[in-house]
Amino acid sequence: MVLSLALNSATSGLGASQKAIETISHNITNINTPGYTRKIYSTKSRVFDNVGQGVASAGIIRHVDEALNKAIRSQMSDLEYLRQSNSYFTRMQNLLGTTGSQSSFAHQIGRLAAAVQQLADQPQEASMQIGFKRAVEDVVYQFNTVGKALDTVRVEADQDIAGAIEQVNMCVNNIHLLNREIGKGLSTNRDITNLLDQRDYQLQLLNEMVEVDSFDLGDGTLGIYTKGGTPLLDAQPYRLVHSAVTGAGPADTYAGGGFGAITVVDTNGAPLDSTRIGPNQDITKDMKGGRIGAAIELRDKTAVDYQAQMDELSVQLQQLMNQINNRGTSYPTIVSSMQGSRVFAGPDVSTMVMGQEANTRVVILGQDGKEIVSKDISDIVASKTSKDIHDPANAPTVREVATAVEEWLRDARPGGGGFPDAEFRWDDKTRTFNLDLKSNEASIVFHDYNSQKASEDVAIELSVNGQAPSERDIKGFSNFFGFNDILERSGTEYIYDSGIRSEGWRVSTSGSLSFYVANNTGGLTLLGGKTLSVGANDTLATIADRINQDPDFQGKIKAEVIPEGGGYRLRIKNKEGDDMIVTQGAGETVLDQLGMKRANVGAAGSLRLNPVLASEPERVSRGDLGYNADTGLWRSEGEGGNTTLIAMERALKAGVDFPSTGGLTSGKRTVQEYASLIMSYNSTQANDVQNRYLYATDMVNQLLVEQGDISGVDMNEEFAQLIIWQKMFQASAKVVSATTDMLDSLLAMKS
């Protein structure tokens, strides 16, 4: 009996040694396997009836610290978020350039200002005119490149989201399968340590895509939920669904439905119960951290902010240069025809009122730059119509003004004759006005001046529906029509944006909004056949909901609340993409409270040099008109005239009132300073993200070292354990051999 006990004990020692050596071998071979943790074969004394029976297996133990693993998963999510963000911001810096770089955006605007100065010094030189044109083209190219690249960046971010979601679905499904195997292992008392390693590794990969919470469901399996509480895995796995776009325009946003939602479906493809994730099924806002969180922030905030900044800069530059260029003359270049750029949806309805402090003189100049004939716009309108362009109560329509000028031009020469074929017409396709004397011997100039005959832009107020002003303080008659523009843009006549408002902002005084589109006869059609009532205390979201839920506006207009900077904009679109005008009721202030105007969105990407100036740079305005009190006539400056160019040079160096846009505060800045501010804003954000990324990298590395000390395989330690278990095996083998010899001896003696 004693020998049998000894033999059994030794045999159990052999078995334990073999299992331990097998475990050590498994550790060594998986030393570089991602997610693998060191295993230790544990034993316990085997006792029966208080008598030792050798050694028994106590199972294989994983050396893990669950709290540490959870911290690592959270930090890995942050690290991946920052890694992606750092990559995105680096790309933004490459687009915008860095302060001081010769290729930076601010430097290009500086070169434009220098080209204006050089042209002002030698206005008659063709080389200076061409140099100015090229400087404008370089700035336009930069705007276009950045504007279109931002569209591409947002599309690629959306595609990154879709790719990461596929990884999420794969990880969730793998964890579900591992849950099942772990459950089976627990029920049959099999070793599950390797399965737990694999599940932890999949959970880490999942957190790199998006940060999640995981919970033990009580049976050894894991449940996984987003930070917003949406289940990704409980008794069954759920699948995230997102359709990436292949292209997007500057006005396409997630808030407006331009980018698809992220939804959850079960194994049958049915949407998750709305009681668990909300009525709209969209969990995009739940997706925090990781690659997905970074891509969502880039697509819906960062790139939107930069686009808004670039659009605002391009519009301010466009307005500044156009306003000044429209003041002057191109003498000695003959300019007998002009193509307007301002869109007038309803010229037969829209009225225009000029301020009392200034007037506009229509001046016809001969080839010598001297006046042939001239007359004030107010007198022309009064003589050809029954209207008074200075009186809001009896203001002429835009078409009436154009027709009156056309009629005057046809018999404008002293003694009659005039320019019988002259035209001042509205183009029903472009909805702009074009003017043509149909003569190569004379130029036409619209010269704004004050009571002292000094140049001063006349202020014009436009009422689109002929009832309430919709655009105030437009400077200059020629600028009003866009006759002598340097820069043009297109594409946003169907969109209106409010100013940036805080989340809790509310309308203070009730009123109404009307939405008009042009018809083909020069009139306006009221969309929906009615106005929209806006109540006091309405928020941007309330107004948007009221528009979107009104059946009369369905299919016609759409409202969106767009995050920008630290606030929100209300955006209203004509769904058919046709020109739209938004007005307020007479005497009301809703439009003013909202700060709503035609949107700048996409301006940078669509900016272009006026094609006429591109082919004829000599048409850029150089000098101005002067009044001779002795003769009572107007004339151009000589060939070296540069008054307008000097004014443009000064304006580029003077401050412009920039509104709060895309995270940048409002304030008076030059256009070059604003360009530098955009780059500085980007640089600050990029440096902040990079510093956080480096810190997160160090933090993760420290945690991984700590995890390695606890869970990692140490080759020296494994070899030491191998020697111990090898000696135990040898000792147990000797006991077996000795016991067998003793038993053989006893059997021989007995026989």
Image (spheres, helix red, strand yellow):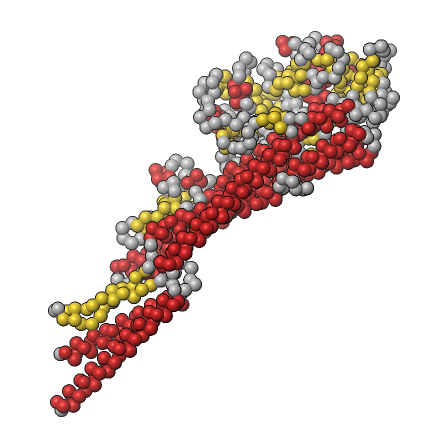
Q: Residue at x 63, y 32 (%)?
A: 673
Q: Is residue 29 visible?
A: yes
Q: Quadrant of the N terminus?
A: bottom left
Q: Residue at x 85, y 18 (%)?
A: 370
Front residue of this view, candidates 196 and 278: 196
Is 105 left, or right, of 122 in this rendering? left
Residue 422 higher or lower than 75, as above or below: above
Q: Residue at x 25, y 77 (%)?
A: 732
Q: Is residue 259 visible?
A: no
Q: Quadrant of residue 329?
A: top right
Q: Quadrant of residue 741?
A: bottom left
Front residue of this view, candidates 231 and 319: 319
Numbered label tally: 0
Is 715 left, or right, of 649 in this rendering? left
* Residue 654 drawn at (x, y percent): 67, 26
Q: Quadrant of residue 123?
A: top right
* Residue 667 drawn at (x, y percent): 58, 26
Residue 561 higher or lower than 271, as above or below: above
Is 16 left, or right, of 84 in this rendering? left
Q: Residue at x 29, y 59 (%)?
A: 184
* Residue 18 drawn at (x, y percent): 30, 73
Front residue of this view, candidates 222 and 344: 222
* Residue 10 drawn at (x, y percent): 22, 76
Q: Quadrant of the C terminus?
A: bottom left
